[in-house]
Amino acid sequence: MIFDPFGDFDTAGYLQNSLALKEPDEIKRAEHLSFELSIEDALSYLAQTNPINYQSVLQVHETLFSDFYPWAGKDRNELVPHLAVFKGSPDNLRHTVFERPDSIRMAVDYALHLAADKERFRERPGEVMGLLAFAHPFLDGNGRTILLVFMELSFRAGFSINWSETRKDDYLRALTNEIGDPSQKHLDHYLTPFVVDISSRDDWPKIIGGIKGLDGLDKENISYGSMDDPEVQKIYMTYRDKQ
């Protein structure tokens, strides 16, 4: 199933991208080029922004992806408030549930609130990252936007994640499990061994450019359904009961 929330894939390409591209490999290359060319601008913006709030997250996404996605910087609640988004089919018990469109900002705000407690944040980095990933604010580009925001937040708390030592598949598995059942602290357990002190932002563009799997929850097997669908509503009720 093609991820086509706007309903115009045949005429406008994937998510109305500026080049009207439809082929997955071409989309990934063009999207990542936009990201790479804008990393330093996004990081500079974050370094000068205090406090970091929901609007900051939207601005980072716009900075990174506006050359490729005309809607960059707008969240799902503004673009497609009637759609629920999942990774995997909702019929599959192992699907990933992302936040309801009307609760995205609440989830991000809560993650930013937790990150403000520097000691707790260092001890539980996966809690913050998991909340940001669960919020899934955008139709695409979530992983890279969230990573840059997370890196700035952790820098202000005096630490970083040694991403070069992490493994893509293990990280994505822990992240998926964290979203599905945050009470078990899956991502805290995975990330904590990679926590290191940090004192400079200078090497960030190079570090970020080398990280694999940043779009792992955006590009593959994304599905969606109407928020008015009783089955979709049941999914959210079941998910809330697990929290």
Image: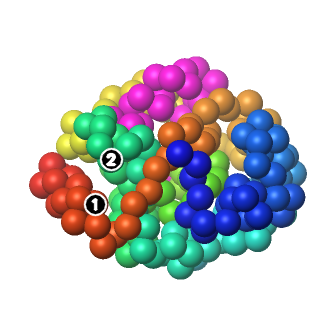
Residue at coordinates 23% horizontally, 59% vertically from top-left? 231
Residue at coordinates 44% horizontally, 44% vertically from top-left? 87
Q: Indicate left or right for 85 with 141 as reference.
A: left
Q: Which residue is mark 2?
A: 90
Number of residues whose C-alpha sits closer than 10 Å to that of mark 1, classed few (under 14), some (14–19) or many (20 or more): some
Q: Residue 66's x, y, as percent?
A: 78, 66
138 in relation to 180, above or below = below
Can residue 121 be seen by looking at this rendering? no
The residue lying toward the viewer, choosing from 242 and 28, is: 28
Q: What secondary structure is the stretch in magenta mostly built from?
A: helix
120 in relation to 229, above or below = above
Q: Are marks 1 and 2 in contact (CB under 8 Å)?
A: yes
Can residue 231 be seen by looking at this rendering? yes
Q: Residue 94's x, y, as percent?
A: 30, 35
Residue flagged by tag 2: what amino acid is it?
Pro
The magenta segment is 157-179
Considering every residue shown, the one lying at the far front of the view is 10
Q: Residue 153's x, y, as percent?
A: 54, 55
| SS for dot 1 | helix
- Alpha carbons under labels 1 and 2: distance apart: 8 Å
The residue lying toward the viewer, choosing from 201 and 214, is: 214
Q: Indicate left or right for 43 with 51 as reference.
A: right
Q: Which residue is mark 1?
A: 232
